[in-house]
């Protein structure tokens, strides 16, 4: 018996079949991409929170080794003191914490000249990975071309802690020092973590009484510690708010004073990063403001720039725990204990 031999040519796909397959693939991509993007952002947020908790442990170890005091945000301040000798470095909080996050004590060029490309007073030592390659994964130093700005480590220590040491009048109820600062002066000019001195790089912060800087403080002065933001996501090495606008509301400093930040895409504020882990890509859309005599409930949330979306970022509190906060909550937390 003879077997029938079929035609060996394979049947080709029709145009309609190809279009159906392409359509199915497009639908799958449209469904999967948002989920993958959300998963990626969630992983970045979790890694950042882990970093902040590690910094919280480093703060605790530093405090134990330094008689209860927190590191300066920068010592002595925005620059060396006016009469400091050449080569005097400015020691930032992340350099002070370096030995407690796996690094070695930071060394500086204390000569009056340049050594191996490092300018006088500059940092010679490399920073640990948490302030670089293993820092906040949503703060990609490489893609942002931050080689000329080695102090933009992705996190910033809070300059306005509003503690009540030295105040002559009681702080408003529930605010733990809001609108009083440390000396009873204008709170937007009271800085904790800088020395009250004139600096070689400018006029300093003693442009008349009362002084606007109070030096470093003890961790025990921050209470309740679970409500005090100590550090967090920031484009700069500090976090600082200002009173601005017709209603004199607390908000992020805009535009950036630092020329390096002005050139970065999507960066609108001099410090902080309220949209790093969610929200609008352009920080200007996150420019909310908090007003009220003592930032006590009920809060008044004012939109400074439409549409006024809060965004999401990570913060470390003084008790060592870290959490993700929307922008409006973060503003209340930074100037009050009421959140």
Image (cartoon, rainbow, N blue to C red):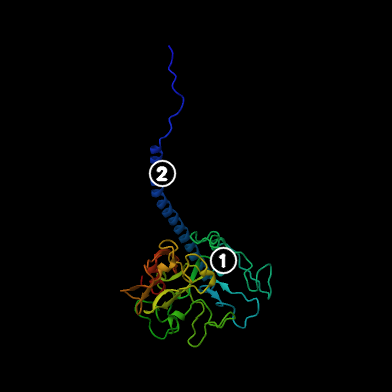
Cα separation between marks 1 and 2: 49 Å
Q: Quick check: 165 above or below 19? A: below
Name the foreground residue: 225 vs 138.
138
The residue sitting at the front extreme is 15
Which residue in the protein does label 2 denote?
25
Residue 233: percent from left, percent from top: 47, 66
**Element assignment for label 2:** helix
Image quadrant assignment for residue 43: bottom left
Which quarter of the rendered picture does the N terminus lie within? top left
Image quadrant assignment for residue 178: bottom left
Which residue in the protein does label 1 denote?
98
Residue 262: percent from left, percent from top: 51, 70
155 lies left or right of 171: right
Which quarter of the rendered picture does the C terminus lie within? bottom left
Residue 257: percent from left, percent from top: 51, 74
Graded by Cα atoms within 10 Å as few (under 14), some (14 to 19) or many (20 or more), the crowding at tag 2 reads few
Residue 91: percent from left, percent from top: 58, 73
């Amino acid at each position: 018996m003879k077997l029938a031999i079929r035609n060996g040519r394979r049947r080709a796909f029709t145009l309609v079949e190809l279009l159906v397959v392409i359509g199915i693939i497009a639908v799958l991509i449209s469904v999967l991409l948002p989920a993958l993007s959300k998963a990626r952002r969630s992983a970045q947020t979790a890694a950042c929170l882990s970093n902040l908790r590690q910094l919280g442990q480093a703060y605790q170890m530093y405090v134990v080794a330094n008689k209860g005091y927190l590191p300066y945000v920068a010592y002595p301040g925005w620059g060396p003191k006016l009469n400091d000798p050449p080569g005097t470095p400015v020691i930032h909080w992340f350099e002070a914490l370096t030995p407690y996050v796996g690094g070695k004590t930071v060394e500086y060029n204390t000569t009056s000249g340049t050594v191996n490309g490092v300018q006088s007073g500059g940092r010679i030592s490399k920073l640990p990975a948490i302030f670089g390659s293993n820092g906040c994964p949503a703060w990609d130093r490489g893609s942002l071309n931050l080689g000329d700005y080695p102090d933009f480590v992705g996190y910033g220590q809070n300059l306005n802690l509003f503690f009540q040491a030295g105040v002559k009048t009681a702080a408003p109820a529930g605010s733990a020092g809001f609108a009083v600062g440390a000396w009873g002066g204008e709170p937007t000019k009271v800085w904790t973590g800088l020395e009250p001195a004139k600096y070689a790089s400018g006029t300093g912060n003693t442009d008349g009484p009362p002084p606007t800087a109070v030096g470093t403080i003890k961790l025990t002065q921050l209470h309740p510690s679970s409500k005090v933001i100590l550090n967090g996501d920031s484009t700069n090495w500090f976090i600082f708010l200002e009173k601005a606008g017709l209603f004199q509301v607390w908000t992020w400093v805009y535009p950036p004073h630092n020329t390096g930040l002005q050139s970065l895409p999507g960066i609108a504020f001099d410090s902080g990063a309220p949209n790093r882990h969610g929200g609008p890509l352009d920080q200007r859309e996150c420019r909310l403001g908090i007003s009220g005599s003592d930032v006590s409930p009920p809060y008044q949330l004012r939109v400074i720039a439409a549409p006024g979306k809060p965004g999401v970022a990570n913060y470390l509190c003084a008790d060592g725990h870290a959490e993700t906060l929307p922008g409006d909550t973060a503003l209340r937390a930074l100037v009050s204990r009421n959140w």
